[in-house]
Image: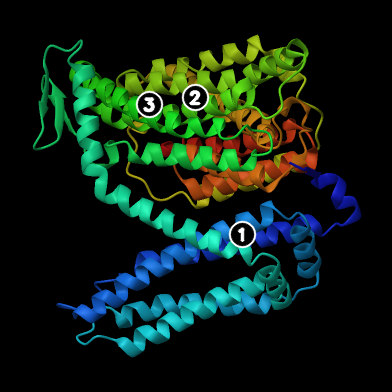
Amino acid sequence: MSTMNIGDRAAHAPKTWRIGARGAALALLLLVEIVLLDGAYSFRDIVGGAPSPAWRVFNDTLQVLVYVALYAGIAFCFLAFAQSRAIVADWLTDARTHRWGRWLGAQTVLFLGLLAALSALSGANATPWAGVSLWMAAAGAMVVCAVIALAPISFWFGFARKHAGHAIVALAFGALTYAAIEFSRNSWHDLSAATLYTSHWLLQLYEPSAFIDVPNRMLGALDFRVIIGAPCSGYEGVGLVLGMMSFYIFAFRRDLRFPHVLVLLPLGALTIWVLNAVRLTLLVSMGAHVSPEVAINGFHSQAGWVFFLTVTISLMLIAHRAPIFRAHPVVDKKQERDPALYLAAALLTPFAALMAARIGGAVFGDSSRWAGVLLIAIPVATIWIYRDAIRGQLAKIGAEPWLVGLAVGGLWIVTEPAAETSTLGAWLETQPPAAAAAWLALRIFGFALIVPIVEELAFRGYLHRALISRRFEAVAPGAFTWVALIVTSVLFGALHGRWLAGALAGAAFAITLYRSKTLSGAIAAHVAANGIIAIYAVMMERWELL
């Protein structure tokens, strides 16, 4: 996969990166608008009372067509851009002089009008055929305006002519994706039953009080019980692993051996499903013998992401390193493998240690906040062990990454949704002043310094480069591909709960990586962001931010 260095290109074409960022922002804006309209428009219940059969058929068909078109559009863009590097250059050339502002303005006006019109359409006594037809036409016009804002019409005509052959494949992918999602929604009952029986079998191996209530899909021990519903059945984890590994295999198809590598898909699905059953088993044991609050609010929410990241990263490493999955065998294993493995360990082990510390902190919960902050010593120790390898990834930087980080932190603060009163403030008031100050110092040390270092080592230090080349250790820190930027940003956002804000923050940290050409830039920006958040949290007593 080819790479390009943003810093090098900026010297010859100072507006190139700005155009790329603008295009990404416009595409993201359209996606957000579609999601908001989809959430606001009910395909069946827009009419008060009992809608006519024709209205239901119309809306059910419309729902299928809209989602298939959305999935097919995404697939079409991936297929076209993946097989033609020239299309990116053509788009940059056309977009450089394109007057996009008026089209963005029209798109925004149409979007606001569509949202406002929904309230007028909802609850109508009669079927609003004319109103909905006009609404659909306006929605189509909004999409057209968004597309023209990205590039002029001439570009899209040429794009369609060159890649018309991909349309059928993309439509098939869109239809299969929609069918798979519907199947997962309708078949989770069967999957949850299998998860229930498997978790009970594991639990009764060591828990004498284990019990199962099949009709109510309930699993428990002693006085603690959980319901194995749709979120616990495991299909979400299976879908995430299959999606992530499919994208990975597609991105590295030239470096991987087919059909051998495809075995990793069912292997990953089975592994994450089994680990989900293990997670539920441990959840019941923890709730029965340790603390129900810790089990539900701590372990349950953290373990799923830890297992997902463990499975996907492990499968990627296996695909990279196992000769059976590689298209090109390594001749000199000693020279090729050892330095890369050591560097990978230096970049990933602190992240694994941080996840272990978070799980440990969740196990203790509010009952022992001191244990939670002291566990930060685990990732600190791994950073110390690999300090020489980590130091080799760093370089001097200027003030720009710090300023970017401060901006990211400020935006994170102002967009933080209102939360319930945190129990941390009440707990700190019960502590002696010196003890409270010491606890806060340890917490801020971990939050503002150790966590940014560890996360940047894993996301921008390893994963970003591994998505560019199998020999990640040979990839320059400032190297750029869209796959690396998008995948690392999305995963970074998923790790932080507020996925959209987290993904945008991850993209901002990646930009500092490109511009500074060193991992130090991303780390500095992340430290500045977390640092300003920590200062604000303490000064304003917004403890939920910590």
Between the C-alphas of marks 1 and 3, the distance is: 52 Å
| Residue at the spot 80% in from the left edge and 58% down from the top edge | 16
The residue type indicated by label 2 comes to Arg
* Residue type indicated by callout 1: Cys
Going 30% across and 77% down the picture, which residue do you hit?
58
Q: Residue at x 41, y 82 (%)?
A: 135
Distance from Cα at disc 3 to Cα at disc 2:
12 Å
Q: Nearer the viewer, residue 307 or 320?
A: 320
Say which residue label 2 marks.
443
Nearest the viewer among 274 and 107 is 274
Q: Nearer the viewer, mark 3 or mark 2?
A: 2
Crowd tier of the residue under label 1, counting other residues whose Cα lies within 10 Å: few below 14, some 14–19, many 20 or above: some
Residue 396 versus residue 427: which sits nearer the camera? 396
Label located before the other in sequence (3 or 2): 3
**Relative to 494, 486 lies left or right:** right
Q: Is residue 76 left or right of residue 192?
A: right
Q: Between marks 1 and 2, how big is the CA–CA gap?
A: 44 Å
Residue 8 lies, with reference to residue 441, above or below; the image says: below
- Foreground label between 1 and 3: 1
Can you give x and y, in whole percent of width and height, for residue 458 in the image?
61, 28
Q: Residue 394, located in which quarter of the rendered image?
A: top right
Q: Which mark is residue 77?
A: 1
